[in-house]
Image (cartoon, coloured by chain):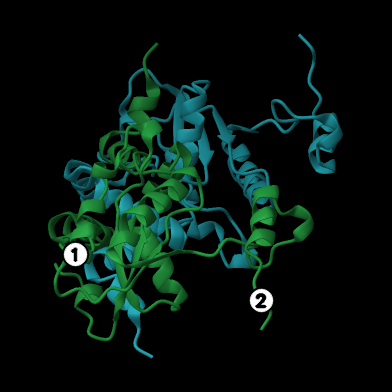
Chain colours: A green, B cyan
């Protein structure tokens, strides 16, 4: 039988649907809806997205100090004179920097590992930016007193935190990690055992 | 207080996040994830999406006969000699053409209204491609015997179907609409009253 579908989705639209579909979390139906939205939207909107895509690939690189993504190196956080240079927050991915910045509760520097140690996946300490973190702390000009390990609270994140603690404490650096406990708005009755167990273990003084 | 967030999301990435966020159904978190995916993905992938966006705006237009979107006019469906020229399926949007083509159960022509009659929203018959449909049916060369009205089974879709039936039947054209009934895989117990009511009203002969 003659494939009518190929006719209906004739080339340029089909190519756009396919390009959207290749993005993570965009299924075939969403890709269709996005493509038809672009068709109806002002040309300016499509051009803006296209230009932003190209610009990101051409101008964004990793900061030579903290390895966060930025259009300049060192990045604006590393260069910002108002940031506290005595503390470095170590995160897994650039998106984690954004998440922590959103809280507006942290004013220090960052270090992006670009992964976590995960022997099961064949990722060792040399595959993430740990040597680079060590170099920052060993720098003669360093003012860093504390490293907050903000890896994810799962097996690999915890193991990476332990590894970093053993590695950095001998340098005389205080190593801390994000508090474990009940999330805001949680219902005790529905909290999972591990979370509730940690909330009891790491119970905090009422002040 | 100094806005640290603006620093962290420095320009090109922030612009890409914003451009993704402007698409329908893409929230701020999804836009971030998509932008960071693009950062990590091969440059080729970003360039392909950018090129597809531009190409769609530059090359896609409406078919002068059926008003479906296409890179050529008349579109490939209207030109396809293997399609049945005695029947036109009238749909609301170009995406509906794709949905019907996917069923592979229809081999006739299409007509895209680009909307439905909706007095509540100030959309009258003159705001959708009804005059253009009438012109196709009045054409001396027309072979059309049947118009399948495939508008959505809601208030506006039904009203538009009724309007078209009154308009087209005097031309000697058979006007049909998509069957109402239980969807495939439905559970009778959970079917809504309207659907179940229609399934009874339009009960079909067991053959």
Closer to us: A2 or B149: A2
**Rendered location of residue B38, percent (x, y):** 27, 50
Residue to which mark 1 is pinned: A138
**Rendered location of residue B93, percent (x, y):** 48, 46
Q: Which mark is residue B168?
A: none
Q: Can I make out residue A87 in this image?
A: yes
- Mark 1 Cα shell of 10 Å, populated few (<14), some (14-19), many (≥20): few
Q: Would you place residue A203 above or below residue B152 in this image?
A: below
Residue to which mark 2 is pinned: A205
Indicate which disc, 2 or 1, sits on the residue closer to the N terminus: 1
Q: Would you place residue A30 above or below residue B29 in this image?
A: above
Who's the residue at 67% across and 43% down the image? B153
Toward which corner of the image does residue A11 lie, by quadrant?
top left
Subunit of label 2: A
Per the model, the C-alpha gap separating discs 2 and 1 is 35 Å
User: What quarter of the picture does the N terminus of chain A occupy?
Assistant: top left
């Amino acid at each position: 039988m003659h494939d009518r579908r190929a006719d209906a989705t004739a080339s340029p639209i089909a190519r756009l649907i396919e390009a959207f579909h290749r993005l993570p979390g965009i299924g075939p139906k969403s890709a269709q809806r996005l493509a038809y939205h672009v068709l109806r939207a002002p040309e300016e909107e499509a051009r803006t997205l296209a230009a932003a895509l190209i610009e990101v690939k051409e101008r964004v690189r990793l900061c030579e100090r903290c390895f966060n993504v930025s259009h300049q190196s060192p990045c604006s956080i590393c260069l910002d004179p108002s940031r506290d240079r005595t503390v470095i927050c170590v995160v897994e991915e650039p998106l984690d920097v954004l998440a922590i910045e959103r809280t507006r509760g942290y004013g220090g520097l960052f270090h992006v590992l670009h992964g976590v140690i995960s022997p099961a996946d064949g990722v060792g300490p040399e595959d993430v930016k740990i040597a680079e973190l060590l170099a920052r702390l060993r720098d003669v000009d360093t003012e860093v007193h504390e490293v907050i390990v903000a890896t994810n609270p799962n097996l690999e994140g915890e193991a990476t935190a332990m590894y970093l603690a053993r590695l950095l404490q001998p340098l005389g650096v205080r190593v801390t990690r994000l508090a474990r406990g009940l999330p805001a708005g949680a219902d005790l009755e529905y909290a999972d055992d591990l979370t509730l167990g940690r909330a009891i273990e790491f119970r905090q003084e009422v002040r």
